[in-house]
Image: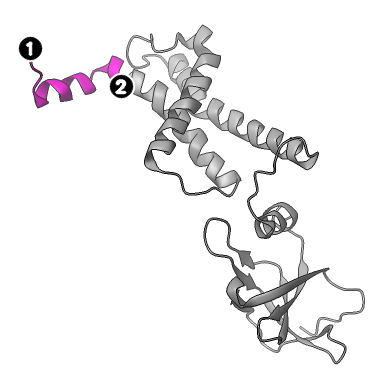
Amino acid sequence: MPQLNLSDILKALVEPTTISAILLFVLPGFVAFKLDQQLRPQIVRSALDSIVEIVAYSVVNDLLWSPLYRLGKTPGLPTTWQQWVLALVVLIVSPAILTILYARAVDWLAARGIVPSPTPKPWDHFFDRVVKAQPSRQVGVILTLRDASRIAGVYKQPAFASSFPTEEQLYLAESWALDKDGGFGERAEATLGLLIDKSDILLLEFFEWPLPLVRDTK
């Protein structure tokens, strides 16, 4: 049995047909995998699980396009602009669209209790699905800390909440003083906001903002 040396292997890998096959079975899945990670909070997967998922995404995408793209049988790399456009659609555009449609379908089914929610924590559900879904939305926040003290702030641009699987941290764009009744008092002078770790928070209370009776002194 003939033995392949390193040069033979490298030569085979750079063959146009080999490159085309690798792109078909890796690139669509990689695009779908990375986009899915951006659309929804994700647990950290092992390398093997990630590879299996990438290949599975690619196979599904390629099967859908196999009548046109002749799954894995394209003779090397594209040579005309029409072939390049088709390759771009098959390898990048199609898996991106399929991933978005899949994520929206799962969200729709989860909202109706048909399937479990893909969002792992209420923290992510609120900040990703309720607040970030409406970029112009502002939210008043009163935080009760573990030492029983209370602070207040406003979640608005450029506020930020971390997402799973990272530890929960919250940046509020404005800091507000509490009045004698425990509600929002006045905006802190020259405030640039506040940053707090979830480990220090006992309770979060959210309010539509601005409140009807709250006067921003800025």
Q: Secondary structure at mark 1?
A: loop
Q: Residue furthest right?
A: 213
Q: Is residue 165 left or right of residue 157?
A: left
Q: Quadrant of the N terminus?
A: top left
Color scheme of the displayed model: one colour
- The three-letter amino acid code for the residue at tag 2 is Ile
Instruction: Determine the residue positioned at 10% across, 26% down.
Output: 6
In this rendering, the answer to whether 83 lies above or below 217 is above
Figure quadrant of residue 96: top right
Mark 1 is surrounded, within 10 Å at the Cα level, by few (under 14), some (14 to 19) or many (20 or more) other residues, namely few
Instruction: Determine the residue positioned at 75% across, 55% down.
Output: 130
Instruction: Determine the residue positioned at 49% across, 41% down.
Output: 34
- The three-letter amino acid code for the residue at tag 1 is Pro
Majority secondary structure in the magenta region: helix
Mark 2 is surrounded, within 10 Å at the Cα level, by few (under 14), some (14 to 19) or many (20 or more) other residues, namely some
Q: Is residue 28 left or right of residue 111?
A: left
Residue picked out by circle 1: 2
Q: Is residue 149 left or right of residue 186?
A: left
Q: Quadrant of the C terminus?
A: bottom right
In this rendering, the answer to whether 212 lies above or below 168 is below
In this rendering, the answer to whether 159 lies above or below 37 is below
Percent coordinates x, y for residue 75 in the rendering: 34, 9
Q: Earlier in the sequence, mark 1 or mark 2?
A: 1
Q: Is residue 55 left or right of residue 65?
A: left
Give residue 19's mark: 2
Which segment is the magenta one? 1-18
> Of tags 1 and 2, which is closer to the observer?
1
Q: Secondary structure at mark 2?
A: helix
Percent coordinates x, y for residue 93 in the rendering: 54, 28
